[in-house]
Image: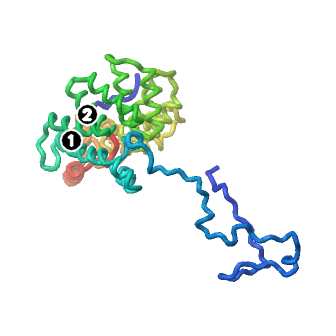
Amino acid sequence: MKQKTWPSRSDGSPFTALPLAKNHQFSKHQPPQPSPSSRNNHHYSKPCFADRPIKSRIINDQRDFSSLPYDLLTRIASPFSQRDLNAASLVCKSWNDALRPLREAMLLLKWGKRFKHGRAGVQPNLEKALDSFLKGVARGSSLAMVDAGLVYWEMGRREEGIALYRRAAQLGDPSGLCNLAIAYLQADFANPKEAVKLLLQSSSAGHVRAQYQLALCLHHGRGIDRNLPEAAKWYLRAAEGGYVRAMYNVSLCYSVGEGFAKSHPQAKKWMKRAADHGHSKAQFEHGLNLFSLSKAVVYLELASRAGETGASHVKDVIVQQLSTASRDRAMRLAENWRALPSSR
C-alpha cells in the first residue's frame, strides 16, 4: 500500500414543558369537570375532540408510499446496505416485490466478493467475480456497479470501469462518487474540478475515503484553492471515521501546525492511533518517540516488517541495550500483534 500522503449550544428540544397547575388534582380515570357556574355560562363549550376516538384525530394527510413506481423505488434503494434493504422490504408487499431484484443482487454481490478474494472456501477467480457483479448490475444495484467497475479498472479496462462508476454516482452511491472522482484525478482522465465536486458530495454523505481525498486536494490545491484549515478539518473527519492514512496526516498537521495549532499531545495521540491501526510510517515514528525501549522495539519491529528499512536499523541499535528477557518479550509482542480494525 502506498502511504506517501503528505505534500512537499447543543441542539436542545424545541418543546418546552408546560407548567402543571398545583391546585388541581385530577384522578387517574376521571377527567376534570367544569364547575356548575361555568356550565351555565353561555361562553362554555364542550371540547370539540372530547367525544372523538384518538384514532379519528390523526390527520389524514398521509401519503401512500406503497404506490411508488417500481423503477423509482429501485432507484432510491439501489445504494442501500443489506440491512436497510431488508428493512425496506418489510414495509409492505408492494415494496417487497419491487425490491426483490436488489435482494438477489446482494446475494450475487456476496458471491462476487468470494470469487474475487477467495473467501469461504472458494478459489479466487476474477472472471467469475466480474460475472457475479455484472448480474448484480443488471438488477440495478449501485454497489455491484462499483465492484464491477473496480474489477474492470484492475483489469486495465478503465473506460468500462469509469462508465460503471458514473452509473453508480448518478444513483447517489457514495463509493461510486468517490471512485469516479479518483478516476478524474488520474492523468489519463484528468478533470480535477469535477473530481472535487464529486468528492465533496461523497464526503458530505460520510464516505471516509472521499473525505481523505478531498483533504488531499485542499492540501495540494488541486482542483480547488489551497486551504490548509479546511484540509485539516476533512483529514480529521476521515480519521474519526477510521481512515488510517488520515490519522497519520492529522498527527502531522498537529505536529507542524498546518491547519491546526501546534499540539504535541494531539500529534502523539493520532500518531499512536495510526500506528495501532497498522500504518507503517506511523509505527516507525511512534517507536522513535517512545521512552520505553522495549515498547519502542515492538513498534520498530512492526514497521520494519512492513518495509520501513530505517526502522530496522534503529531497532538493531536499541536491541543491543536490552536484556535477553526484554528483547524476547518485545519480539513476542510484535509476533502476536494485530492491527485494530479500520476503514483503510
Image x and y of residue 132, in percent: 20, 39
Residue hosting label 2: 148
Image x and y of residue 184, in percent: 37, 22
In the picture shown, does residue 282 fall above or below 97? above
Could you say which is closer to the camera, residue 328 or residue 87?
87
Say few, some or many: other residues with alpha carbon within 10 Å of mark 2 (under 14 / 14 to 19 / 20 or more): many
Could you say which is closer to the camera, residue 1 or residue 269?
1
Residue hosting label 1: 112
The image quarter containing residue 13 is: bottom right
In the picture shown, does residue 92 fall above or below 281? below
Examine the rendering and report whether any part of residue 201 can be seen: yes
Left or right: 34 with respect to 91? Answer: right
Say which quadrant the N terminus sits in: top left
Could you say which is closer to the camera, residue 63 or residue 149?
63
Amino acid type at image mark 2: Ala
In the picture shown, does residue 190 fall above or below 269? above
| Residue at x-position 37% and y-position 18% | 190
The image quarter containing residue 38 is: bottom right
Say few, some or many: other residues with alpha carbon within 10 Å of mark 1 (under 14 / 14 to 19 / 20 or more): many
In the picture shown, does residue 30 fall above or below 215? below
| Residue at x-position 28% and y-position 40% | 139
Q: Secondary structure at mark 1?
A: helix
| Residue at x-position 16% and y-position 50% | 120
Amino acid type at image mark 1: Gly
Marks 1 and 2 close (CB-CB < 8 Å): yes
Q: Secondary structure at mark 2?
A: helix
